[in-house]
Image (cartoon, grey):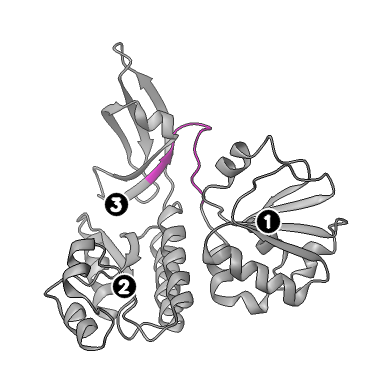
Amino acid sequence: MEDIEKAFEYTYKYKIGSSGSLIFGAETETLETVKESLNWYTQHTKEHCSTPIRQFGYIESYPGCTYYSNAVKNGKILDRYQYIKNGNYIINITQMSDSEYEIIGKIAKLKQSEIISLGKVIAIEHQKNNSFFDITIICPYCGSIVKYRNIENIFLEKGHIRKLGCRKCHVLNDYILNDNNVLVQKYYLVDWLLLMEKYNYNLFFNKIAENKILIVGKSIVAKLLFEQLQKNVSKEFVLYKKIKDKTEKDTVIIFTDPINYKYDLSNNSDLIKGKVYSIEDVVIASIERKC
């Protein structure tokens, strides 16, 4: 880790562009080593006001690599021909359970969706042909004012530009362009997935008068939240993969995919009659803060 830190410090000092990845799921990976990696990432970002870590994901066991050979030897891959034919090289080669393995995949997806370093947009100039625009920004790392030309309008529709490299210091930054932006600076769900037993869920649900709560989602997150709430909160909880029928006014709905929360809310607006929350609302409210 010291060598990695030193290498990054040289890239910052000499203004060399760099980009790295946090890849989870090696044979010795555990939830504790995932925590260690994320703690290093958080600390590095605070110290340097930026980070070259731009990708989060699973290790892929490609045919021919050591991970693949070991997976065949250890019975993780039973049919080599079918494995290669399927073309999906993400498999659990760790000693973790499949549920724990799915958790780190969800963490990687959430971290990938977060804003890493947010710069400021000074001006957006639309070109005459209306297919492209120019943008002037302030780099959050070195403070330089930089103008970029001929950017496609699709980024205006998305509401943001990600991983835009500064021409002076070469650090990659994110920029919000308009109100359509859906980028989030921090998903509190990441911490919850690693420490869910330490949350006080009654801090949130004591303020909810309704007794029937629908937990909506298909992933491991929905299942884990459902289990935690059943164990710790004295209300009626029902787990749904998706909303099929109109809900009653005295029913509370909690969507468990914070990345697509706005989409889920809009897509189910005709069926929702009661109060609606994101899992982020529950998690943030359930953190016990020490005075």
Q: Vertical placement of 51 versus 169: above or below?
A: below
Q: Vertical placement of 192 versus 15: above or below?
A: below
| Quadrant of res 7 | bottom left
Q: Whole-percent x and y of residue 269? A: 67, 36
Q: Nearer the viewer, mark 1 or mark 2?
A: 2
Residue extending furthest toward the top: 128
Pick the residue in front: 128 or 77.
77
* Amino acid at pointer 2: Ile
SS of the residue at dot 3? loop
Judging by the rendered image, the residue that carries numbered circle 1 is 281
Residue 35 visible? The answer is: yes
Which range of residues does the magenta coloring cover? 174-184
Number of residue marks: 3
Judging by the rendered image, the residue that carries numbered circle 3 is 171
Q: Whole-percent x and y of residue 131? A: 30, 19
Pick the residue in front: 284 or 243.
243
Judging by the rendered image, the residue that carries numbered circle 2 is 91
Lateral position of residue 18 relative to residue 141, left or right? left
